[in-house]
Amino acid sequence: MKVVLKLLRSFALCACLLFLANVRCYSQSFRTDTIGFSVFFKQGRSEIDMNYRGNGSNLLSFADTITALDEDPLANVKYVYVEGAASPEGASDYNQALSERRTESIREWLLKHTTLDIGQIRTASIGVDWDGLAAILGETDWEYSDTIVNIIRDTPLWITRGGKVVDGRKKRLMDLEGGKPWRWMLDSIYPELRQGGADVKCYVVRIPDPQVLRDTVTVTVNTKDTVYLGEPAGPIEVLEPIFAVRTNLILPLMNIGVEVPIGNRWSVGADWYYTWAWRKWFKDLNMTNCLQMLGGGLDVRYWFGKRHTPERVNRQNRLWGHSMGAYVYGGYYDFEYDYKGYQGEFSNIGLDYMYSARLGKRHGLRMELSLGVGYIHSKAREYNVFTAGGNAFRTGVVKNVNWIGPTKATISLVVPINRRVTYDHDEVR
């Protein structure tokens, strides 16, 4: 059930991001601006000190900005996001509670000194500011910087075995090189994180300036028997796809692709997959399973139907309808289940059928469905893992994999990137 909920959340986020990207392609689209600043706190404190590190000027300037936005008829404050954090040392429960108190202090100040209402302020307390620590280390030439950043990135907050915590991110940092790097960070880096407290970001939706309406042309039509006489109709404006961006919803947010038309009948595409699923996301698997794949591919396809004939007016129908394609893919994989797995490279070649359908608006989002049959070759190297999340030890067994059959399936959400063109009325059928 957890897996289904995560996939549904990823699908919704992917659809929202792609839809916003498409909306921005139009001249009358809305624009979202972000205004941000930080609020600093003294060590262990959650009260806002207006005289500390520029807090007063930042907060008062932000309040004036909110007032100006309220008076601007073309701006709408969508919401303000406040995220609180603390430094890594100290108990986890204390750090979480401290970040929550800091976030609440900023929320109360905003409600008291600005016109924001409670529904416009969203808050989050992340506890330890691991991202802030990694960012500071990334700007230094310290010999342990890369090692510590890798631990922050790759090690879960807690590692459990049999329901008990046996390891974790903070423990590995404290144990590194006998604790020498941890003691240096206590003196040199953590003071900066202790004084940090929360980031405030305001998201403003700006409405485009109203455009002057075109002059109205009155056309007089004279009738005689069944013959209609009138002035010729004016030019017609349509949208032509330049290219399209897509993502396969079977693996949401772990891939991206692009398709570029070549004339009306042909197109070429490329896709990139970064499926790094179980080790990173599924904490309940205790790092004993792995589903990882890194790869990409190219395709060339032919589009069927009268709507793709060479006439200029059919350019608006590019990348839409039925098509057949040839594809080639390649990459690397790592599949592990219950301490045993296989690693290797693969190559894939085949043919596919694809149908692209428009969703709702005539030139808006599209859905692509495809199924491909082809040949996959790989040499799978067997390995064993003896501890959860530990190193892989190869057994020496190598399996030759040769597969002929279904090798490709996609259910993709597609955003066409268009340009506006004008046709004479008699060009449009």
Image: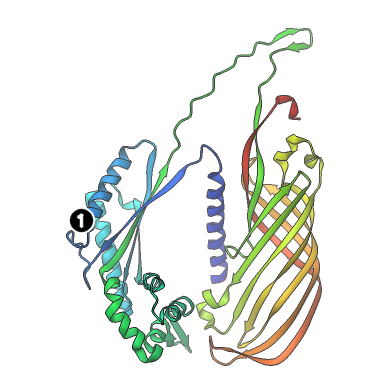
Q: In the image, what residue occupies the spot 41% across and 78% down? A: 145
Which residue reaches farthest front?
Answer: 141
Amino acid type of the residue that numbered disc 1 sits on in the rendered structure:
Gly
Taking the image as shown, residue 3 lies to the left or right of residue 51, namely right
Number of marks in picture: 1
Q: What is the quadrant of the C terminus in the image?
A: top right
Examine the rendering and report whether any part of residue 91 can be seen.
no
Q: Which residue is mark 1?
A: 56
Q: In the image, what residue occupies the spot 53% across and 44% down? A: 24
Which residue reaches farthest top?
Answer: 224
Q: What is the quadrant of the N terminus in the image?
A: bottom right
Mark 1: give few (<14), some (14-19) or many (20+) Cα within 10 Å: some
Q: Horizontal and vertical percent for residue 396?
A: 70, 92
Residue 423 image-quadrant placement: top right
Q: Horizontal and vertical percent for residue 418?
A: 62, 42
Using the image, determine if residue 98 lies above or below residue 248. below
Residue 383 image-quadrant placement: bottom right
Q: In the image, what residue occupies the spot 31% across and 52% down? A: 118
Q: Horizontal and vertical percent for residue 257?
A: 65, 58
Display coloring:
rainbow
Using the image, determine if residue 161 lies above or below residue 72. below
Q: Horizontal and vertical percent for residue 77?
A: 36, 46
Taking the image as shown, residue 76 lies to the left or right of residue 334, namely left
Per the image, label 1 sits on a secondary structure element best described as helix
Which residue reaches farthest left?
Answer: 51
Taking the image as shown, residue 302 lies to the left or right of residue 414, namely right
Nearer to the camera, 178 or 403: 178
Residue 220 image-quadrant placement: top right
